[in-house]
Structures are given as C-alpha cells and as structure tokens.
C-alpha cells in the first residue's frame, strides 16, 4: 500500500540522526504486546481463510455464486495477512532496512495494493450477488461469476499495481536499504491517493450500503409476508418458515460485513485524506500511531471476514467436523493397512 511508502519517505526525510526523532512512539512493552496480539489475530485469520476455502459448500452443479465470491474474498484476506501484514510490520519496525532483497522489492511490493483491492471488491461482489438474488430474483451463472472474479483481480492489478511498477525504487546508501515508491511529483501521489480513496472506500461503501438498505427492506417485508403465510397455510408452513430463515441468514451475513468494512477501513482512508490535505502530516508527532491504527484496521477486516462467514453460514461447523472426521477416518484406514502389511508378508512366506 502507498501508505507504507509514505511512511518510509517520512522517515527518510527526517533531518535528525534518530530515525524516530520527533515522533511519539509506544513504550517497548506496548509494542511487544501490540505485535503479539496482531500476529495472533493474523494467525487466526489465516486459519479461518483456509478453512473457508475448504469448507465452502459445493452443490450438484458446482459452487454457488456466493460461495465462489467467498473463496475470492478468503484468498484476498489470506494474502493480506501473509504478505501485507508482515511487510507493514517490517516497515514500522525497521524503516531504514528492507530485508527481503532487491528482487522481492520490485516483484512483491507493488502487489500489496492488488490484494487490498481484490479483498474490497470481493465484498462488493458478495453484496451485489445477494442484491441480485433477493431484489432482482436473478442468479449469476458459474461462468459469469468466474468472469467477474477474474475482472476483480485483473482490474485490481491494472488499476493499482501497474502505475507502481514504474516508480518502485530500491536504494542502498549510507542511511540504509530502502524499498519505496518514488513519485515523479506530488501531483501523481495526489491522483493515486484520490483514486484509492474513491475506488477502495467511497464507491464500495456506497454500493454496499445501498444494496444492504434495499435488501434489508425487502427481507423485512418478505419475512412478515412468509410468517403470515405460514400461519394461514398449514400445508406450506415449513416452506414459508424456511424462507424466513434464509432471509435472516442473508441479513446476518451482510450486516457485519458492512459494519466491519466501514469501521476497519476508515482509518487507512482517513490517513490518505490527511496526506492529501495536510502537507506536514508526515511530520506529525502522532504519525507512527496513526500508521499503526491503519495496519490494525486492515488486519481486523481480513480476520473478521472468515469469522463472520463461519458464524452466519448454515452448517459451517457441521461441514467442518464432517471434513475433519473424513480425513481422520482415511488416515486411520491407511494406518491400519500399513500395520497389516508385515503380517501379509509373513503369511505369504
């Protein structure tokens, strides 16, 4: 993310000998505690994202549109937690030393924005898919869904990574080893930050909020109708109550996704706006604190997504237990076959 580059450039531009001179920093015990909590949360998020990819249901005709979008979101969250988060920590803890080498600087660093963008627009795709299914009563074909996911990832690369490939810079000098974005001018930085803010927060939030409000209104009306029908038509009672439960699950999935996205992504976008509006923001005494809040927000969003899905999705835990028990039975079967082989050999002899 360009926030990481801004952080590095802010440190580099300091005229003080101490790399953190002028900034308010956390006491060492607080830093250790914060990093421990962040790392543990990221670890849980990694496990959760992997489980979502493995346990997402698959029907007779393949996975549904919602399931495929959830897998796209889980993959993006996984990459954020195993790539973006460690690099953010490296930038914070060692701003004057890039330990991953020149090749990783040019190949990996620009991709951080793609993972971030793919995560956000996968959330948007989930909201739109729910909207199509409930308001428009239309479902996407698997081919259409896969094409949409491809557009999300390829579009994220073209829009947010391609411009960075021309300005990514690796430098070794007396001050240290740096990997950062060397903007041609302040205007280019402003344009990129504006694009990021609009395409990765304002527009997604507008789409998600609109679909959520429309879906909530429709679900509330539909639930009232089906509850009334379940009382008046005994024959269709189970079917109507099933529809009410489906509506409730849809609302339970969208509500936390909207809330978590709005809150967790606000700090990093407020950070971008501050960079645009305040020329001296990178020299602010609380700059390091603001930076850490942005990192925490992005991590929490990626950690929360699989947790939300596992809680609100029907039979998630039962499918997980079934998968684990199946793997366990296969392992026991293989073990028993292994134990029997020596006896088989003795019999043959």
Image (spheres, rainbow, N blue to C red):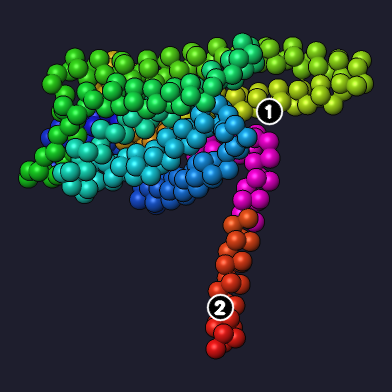
Going from N to C along the chain, the mark reached first, 2 or 1, is: 1
For the N terminus, the quadrant is: top left
315 and 94: which one is in front? 315
**Element at label 1:** helix
Q: Which residue: 59% across, 83% down?
A: 343
- Where is residue 45 drawn, in percent x and y? 49, 43
Q: Which residue: 35% across, 50% down?
A: 28
| Relative to 288, 100 lies left or right | left
Q: Main secondary structure of the magenta part?
A: helix
344 and 312: which one is in front? 344
The disc label shown at residue 281, or none: none
Q: Which residue: 52% across, 26% down?
A: 142
From the image, tell me which residue sits under label 2: 341
From the image, tell me which residue sits under label 1: 249
Q: Is residue 309 magenta?
A: yes
* Quadrant of the rendered image containing residue 273: top left
Few, some or many C-alpha atoms within 10 Å of disc 1 (few <14, some 14-19, many ≥20)?
some
52 and 39: which one is in front? 52
Image height check: is 35 above or below 185?
A: below
Q: Which residue: 65% across, 45% down?
A: 319
- Where is residue 287 drawn, in percent x and y? 30, 31
| Relative to 33, 184 lies left or right | left
The magenta stretch is 299-325
């Amino acid at each position: 993310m360009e926030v990481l580059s801004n952080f590095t450039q802010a440190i580099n531009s300091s005229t003080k000998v101490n790399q953190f001179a002028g900034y308010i920093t956390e006491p060492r015990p607080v830093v250790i505690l914060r990093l421990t909590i962040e790392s543990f949360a990221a670890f849980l998020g990694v496990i959760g994202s992997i489980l979502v990819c493995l346990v997402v249901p698959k029907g007779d005709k393949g996975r549904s549109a919602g399931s495929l979008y959830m897998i796209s979101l889980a993959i993006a969250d996984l990459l954020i937690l195993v790539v973006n988060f460690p690099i953010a920590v490296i930038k914070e803890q060692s701003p004057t030393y890039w330990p991953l080498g020149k090749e990783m600087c040019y190949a990996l660093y620009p991709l951080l924005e793609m993972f971030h963008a793919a995560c956000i627009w996968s959330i948007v795709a989930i909201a739109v898919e729910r909207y199509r299914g409930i308001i428009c009563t239309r479902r996407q074909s698997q081919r259409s869904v896969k094409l949409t996911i491809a557009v999300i990832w390829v579009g994220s690369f073209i829009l947010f990574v391609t411009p960075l490939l021309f300005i990514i810079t690796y430098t070794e000098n007396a001050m240290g080893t740096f990997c950062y974005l060397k903007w041609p001018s302040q205007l280019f930085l402003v344009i990129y930050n504006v694009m990021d803010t609009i395409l990765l927060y304002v527009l997604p939030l507008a789409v998600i909020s609109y679909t959520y409000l429309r879906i909530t209104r429709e679900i509330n009306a539909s639930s009232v109708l089906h509850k009334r029908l379940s009382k008046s038509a005994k024959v269709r009672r189970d079917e109507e109550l099933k529809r009410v439960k489906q509506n409730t699950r849809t609302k339970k999935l969208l509500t936390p996704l909207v809330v978590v996205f709005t809150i967790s992504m606000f700090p990093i976008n407020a950070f971008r706006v501050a960079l645009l509006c305040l020329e001296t923001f990178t020299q602010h005494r609380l700059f390091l604190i603001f930076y850490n809040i942005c990192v925490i927000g992005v991590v929490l969003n990626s950690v929360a997504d699989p947790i939300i899905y596992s809680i609100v999705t029907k039979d998630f835990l039962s499918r997980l237990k079934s998968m684990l028990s199946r793997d366990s039975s296969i392992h026991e079967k293989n073990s028993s076959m292994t134990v029997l082989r020596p006896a088989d050999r003795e019999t043959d002899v």
